[in-house]
Image: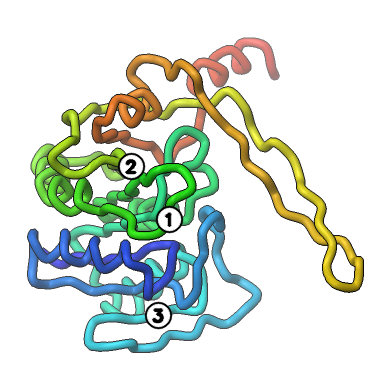
Amino acid sequence: MRILITNDDGIHAHGIGVLEEIARALSDDVFVVAPELDQSGVAHSLSLNDPLRLREVSPRHFAVKGTPTDCVIMGVYKVLDGIKPDLVLSGVNIGHNLAEDVIYSGTVAGAMEGAVLGVPSIALSQGYPAGDRIGIDFSAALVHGPRIIKQILDMGMPADVLTNVNFPSVPADKVGGVSVTRQGRRDANLAGVEERFDGRKNPYYWIQYARTRSAPPVGTDLEAIASGRISVTPLRLDLTDEATLKRFSQSLS
């Protein structure tokens, strides 16, 4: 089984090394194609106005000066010379990709592009305690990841579906199990923009997030993670809302 790995945290991120270890528990045929620099939050963006630079970091490890989407395309059509891999894995992201995070996530987008190209694709993200990005414990992903990936592949995924897997911020032996979930939604959206000033008193800005869910709905990715469980969420490429489509069709002409 040939596996193509990417991420959005960059080629030197700790999480992509963890993901490679997970992949090698499944296959010896692994290629890594990841962004040269951190591309968190770029979503499913594609570089159309800038050339892509491809750098071989080491055998079977390549850096692309572009987005996770660019990396999957370059991985398939350049590094693998147009021969599609059997599996695309994206991550392991530093921090969860839950609820509306999937709209912004470059990690999810990497898996999404794999699905667009007709390859079974899985995004993986590891949670960590709030405010503590140093010394993140990836053991939950590392220990449970290979088994979950194999089970997903054994069950099979439709051509237009990718899978979003999130691991709780607990050690591997404290994980409370696996929940197959739907995408949740938090109580609040973007909190706003914080204004700061540089040494010359010129303003600059940071986008602030302050999103919480005090009582996550049952069956959602948010509830699973809050309960210390692994969340496995199938996502569709087709974003059409069938109920609204039917309602509009009855009224619009």
| Residue picked out by circle 2 | 164
Q: Amino acid at mark 2?
A: Asn
Name the residue carrying label 3: 63
Label 2, label 1: how far apart the Cα atoms are = 21 Å
Left or right: residue 206 compared with residue 227: right
For marks 3 and 1, give the one nearer the viewer: 1
Residue 180, quarter of the rendered image = top left
Q: Is residue 205 left or right of residue 245?
A: right
Q: Position of residue 111 (x, y in %)?
A: 36, 53
N-terminal label among 3 and 1 = 3
Q: Which mark is residue 66?
A: none
Q: Secondary structure at mark 1?
A: loop
Residue 133: which disc? 1
- In the foreground, 229 or 28: 229
* Amino acid residing under circle 3: Ala
Cα–Cα span, label 3 and label 2 = 24 Å
Kind of residue at badge 1: Arg
User: Going 84% across and 62% down the picture, which residue do you hit?
Assistant: 197
The answer to whether residue 138 is above or below residue 50 is: above
Along the line of sight, the residue nearer the viewer: 130 or 51: 130
How many neighbours does mark 3 have within 10 angstroms: few (below 14), some (14-19), or many (20 or more)? many
Q: Nearer the viewer, residue 250 or 191?
A: 191
Q: Is residue 236 above or below residue 114?
A: above
- Closer to the camera, 33 or 236? 33
